[in-house]
Amino acid sequence: MNGQNRKDISPGKEVYIVLKRDQRTGEKTRGVVKDILTKSSFHPHGIKVRLKDGQIGRVQSVI
């Protein structure tokens, strides 16, 4: 799953995100979703989430 649809993501799922500082390089960070921050059901760049360790970024893929 590519992380653009909110219905595919829920707290507790393991995902790869791109942090704001890594958007140019595209480096991915792996973590577990704590909160979903995007309110809309779809976002072309990925749904924004907060991981359990506090990092915030857009979901690139759901593991």
Image (tube, rainbow, N blue to C red):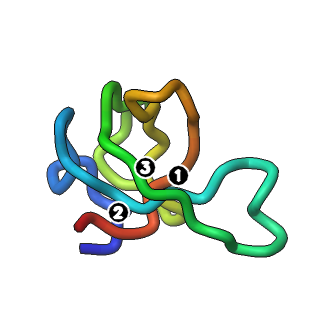
Percent x, y of residue 49: 44, 37
Contact between labelled residues 3 and 1, with CB atoms less than 8 Å apart: yes
Q: Is residue 10 left or right of residue 40?
A: left
The residue pinned by badge 2 equals 3
Query: Which numbered disc flags the more N-terminal residue, 2 or 1?
Result: 2
Quarter of the image where the N terminus is located: bottom left
Element type at mark 1: strand
Q: Is residue 10 left or right of residue 4?
A: left
Q: Is residue 26 left or right of residue 32?
A: right
Q: Please state which amino acid type lies under the numbered disc 3.
A: Ile
Estimate the spatial distance between the alpha carbons at disc 3 and disc 2, rounded to whole Å: 6 Å
Estimate the spatial distance between the alpha carbons at disc 1 and disc 3, rounded to whole Å: 5 Å
Q: Please state which amino acid type lies under the numbered disc 2.
A: Gly
Q: Are there few (<14), some (14-19), or many (20+) residues within 10 Å of tag 3?
A: many
Residue in the picture at 35% in, 31% down: 36
| Up/down of 61 relative to 11, above or below | below
Residue toward you, 37 or 21: 21
Residue in the picture at 20% in, 33% down: 11
Residue toward you, 61 or 37: 61
Q: Is residue 29 left or right of residue 34?
A: right
Estimate the spatial distance between the alpha carbons at disc 2 and disc 1, rounded to whole Å: 8 Å
The residue pinned by badge 1 equals 58
Query: Which numbered disc flags the more N-terminal residue, 1 or 3?
Result: 3
Percent x, y of residue 61: 35, 69
Residue in the picture at 53% in, 52% down: 58
Q: Are there few (<14), some (14-19), or many (20+) residues within 10 Å of tag 2?
A: many
Q: Which mark is residue 47?
A: 3
Residue in the picture at 48% in, 42% down: 48
